[in-house]
Each structure stands twice: as structure tokens, then as C-alpha cells.
Image: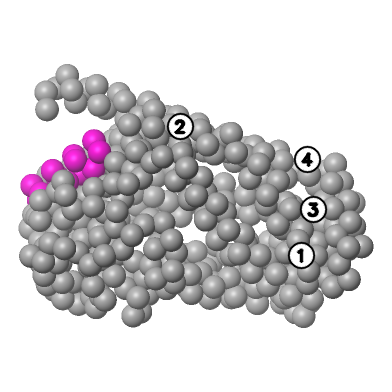
Amino acid sequence: MSNQDNDSLNKKAKKYSNIRYALNIVDTVYLLILLFSFQGLGLSKILTRKLSSLFAANYLVIPAYFLIVYIGYCLLNFPLNFYQTFILEHKFALSCQKISDWFKDQIKAGVISYIIGAILIGAFYFMLKHFVYIWWLVISLFWIFFSLILAKLTPVVIIPLFFKYKRLSDELLRERILRLAKNFKVKILDVFEIDFSKKTLKANAAFVGIGASKRVILADTLKDKYSHNEIEVILAHEFAHYKLKHLLKLIIVNSLVIIISFYLIFKTSDYALGLFGLDSLSNVAVLPIIFIYFVLFGIVTQPWENFISRRLERNADRLALTITGLKEDFISTMEKLANQNLADRNPGPIIKFFFFDHPPIDERIGMAKK
């Protein structure tokens, strides 16, 4: 590829990334506006009263309330979501998905999100009722446990809803990956490929699952366009996370964020409730305030979680290079991924701080060269 082509591609990637950054900010601000409006205008109280008169049992009010609010948000957010996940991806030639398939995926993702949300919200109100003084700790532990269950079920239940699974057909590559996993002392079920190319032109690989569900997943867009050496160094990076106990460290970090978040709600909720003329967290009408808390917590904590994640990613890169010795293949892989996924290779420090949970591509290449 000529220097002129590289410059053109880098400009395209920068434009694509800048649009995504802007949309991410708009999405967050828009959500906060909707939540504050829904709570401040008294609509949450009205909806709660209507549902309470309709359902005698409180355990039916909660999922019904969340269903109505969730559908309302999806409808109000539809234009932004459609542009961000469909129009933008097609505009930059990163998606080949038909609009009918996009709608099907949106419905499936919406149903899954609702079920997960309903379980977590139901557990929240149950803990509020039965653990008056330590509900913040009990619900935190439940959410942490539930997230581990989801991690175990994701490769078995959720991913097959969106992609077709099959055992990796390239037997030579499969044996090589299994041998690599053994070198890292990682036990995996098998190596699978999924039909990424039916929806996107981006490439990806993952080491997913917990316990017996641990497996390697290769996108066909990666398997068909990358050499065995390049795929090996990608997966060496993933196995390095396991070897260095990064998954455990991230679970601890995320668990601390959850516990601190609920504790802050416990300590400050009386003031927040007073602003909206409410008197108890156990009132279902308070739910938008809880959502506001978590959106604001996310704005504050996500950059610091990203900072920790970037450090772990650098360590995984170093170990992968040390064990495989495939420096040139690592560099060529980073170049290919940057071009194929239209990655922002060298973002500014503020963008990096807020949006990047991996080191930028140019940093990773620079590290490998050293």
C-alpha cells in the first residue's frame, strides 16, 4: 500500500472514529436528559400509580414498569441507534448486513437486555425490602455473581443467537491454537469459528467463557485474511490475560466499582430523593434516579477502568511477544486490524483517556519494535 493510500485510509479512520466519539457523548447526554425529564415531570410517579392500580402484586408492577420504560427509551433512541449501528457502518463500508437482519438482531438484543435488566432490578427491590441496612452490599454481591453466570453462559447461549458456530475447519490451525493454549496452561473446550462476514467486515478473535465453557472464537473475517502466525500472536495475547490473572483482576476492579456505586446510593439517596419529592428507594417510581446514578458513575469510573485495562493489555502484549517471538507478525497484525476495523491509530490524550480500553495501535506497534 502506497503512502498516499495509507494517508487516505488514516484520514477515513480518523473521521469514522471522531463521529463515533461524538455519537457516544450525544447518546449519554440524551439518556440523562430523558431520565431527568421522566423523573422531574412526574411521569414516573404517574406510571407507577397506574400500574399499581392495575396489578395487586408489587412483583408484577416492577417488570411491567421496566418493560414500558425500556420500550419507550428504545423508540425515542431509535434514530440515534439506527444511525450509529447501521447507517454509519454502511457509510464507511464496514457492514454488509441487510436491514431486515439488523432489525432481527436489535429485537433479540432488546429481549436479552430486558430479561437481564428485569432480573437485576427485581433483585434490587427484593434486597431493599429484606435487607434494610445492608441492601447495598447484598445486591452488589448478587450483581457480581450474576455477571459471572452471564460470562459462563454467553458463549453457550447468547453468541449462538447472533452467529452460527462451528468447530474450526482448518485442522492445522486448530491444532496449533490448542498447542499454544497448552503452552500457556490454559484448558479450553475447543476452537470455533463464527460467520462474522454475514454482518460486518471487521475482524475479531476472543477467548471467552468461564470454567468448562472456556473456548476460542475466531471470526471468519480474521481466519480467512490472516496468516497462522498472525492468528497465533493474537491468541497468545488473549491467553496471556489468563496466564497473568488479568481476568481475576478485572473482576475485582469491576466488583469494587459495583460495591462503591451502591454504597454511594445508600449514603446519598435521601438527598437525591428530596430533589424530586420522593421519600423512599423502595418506590418503583424512583427507578430513573437509580439509572441516573449509574450513568453518572459510569462517566466518572469508566476512564479509570480504561486506564487499568490499558496497562493490562500492554502486559499481555509483552508476554505474547516474549513467548511466541513473532514480533514482525504482531506488527503486521496490528496494521491489518487498524486498516480493517478503521481504528484510530493515534488519538489525542483526552480521547484516549475517556474512550480507549486498549493502547492505541501505534503505541502497540511502537512497543513491539522496541
Compute the Cα span from label 4 to label 1: 20 Å
Closer to the chain start, of discs 1 and 2, is: 1
Of the two numbered discs 2 and 4 in the rendering, the one whose residue sits closer to the viewer: 2
Residue 323 makes an appearance in the image: no
Closer to the chain start, of discs 3 and 1, is: 1
Closer to the chain start, of discs 2 and 3, is: 2
Q: Amino acid at mark 1?
A: Ile
Quarter assignment of residue 133: bottom right
Query: Residue drawn at (73%, 64%), measured in percent from left and top?
Result: 63
Quadrant location, the N terminus: top left
Q: Amino acid at mark 4?
A: Ser
- Residue 102 included in the magenta stretch of the image: no
Q: Main secondary structure of the magenta part?
A: helix
The image position of residue 117, as x and y in percent, is 62, 62
Neighbours of disc 4 within 10 Å: few (<14), some (14-19), many (20+)? some
Query: Residue drawn at (35%, 29%), measured in percent from left and top?
Result: 92
- The residue that mark 2 highlights is 87
Of the two numbered discs 3 and 1 in the rendering, the one whose residue sits closer to the viewer: 1
Q: How many marks?
A: 4
Compute the Cα span from label 3 to label 1: 21 Å
Residue furthest top as drawn: 4
- The residue that mark 4 highlights is 37
The image position of residue 247, as x and y in percent, is 37, 68
Q: Write down the region rendered in magenta.
A: 327-340
- The residue that mark 3 highlights is 272
Q: Amino acid at mark 3?
A: Ala
Compute the Cα span from label 2 to label 4: 28 Å
Compute the Cα span from label 1 to label 2: 35 Å
Q: Nearer the viewer, residue 278 or 104?
A: 104
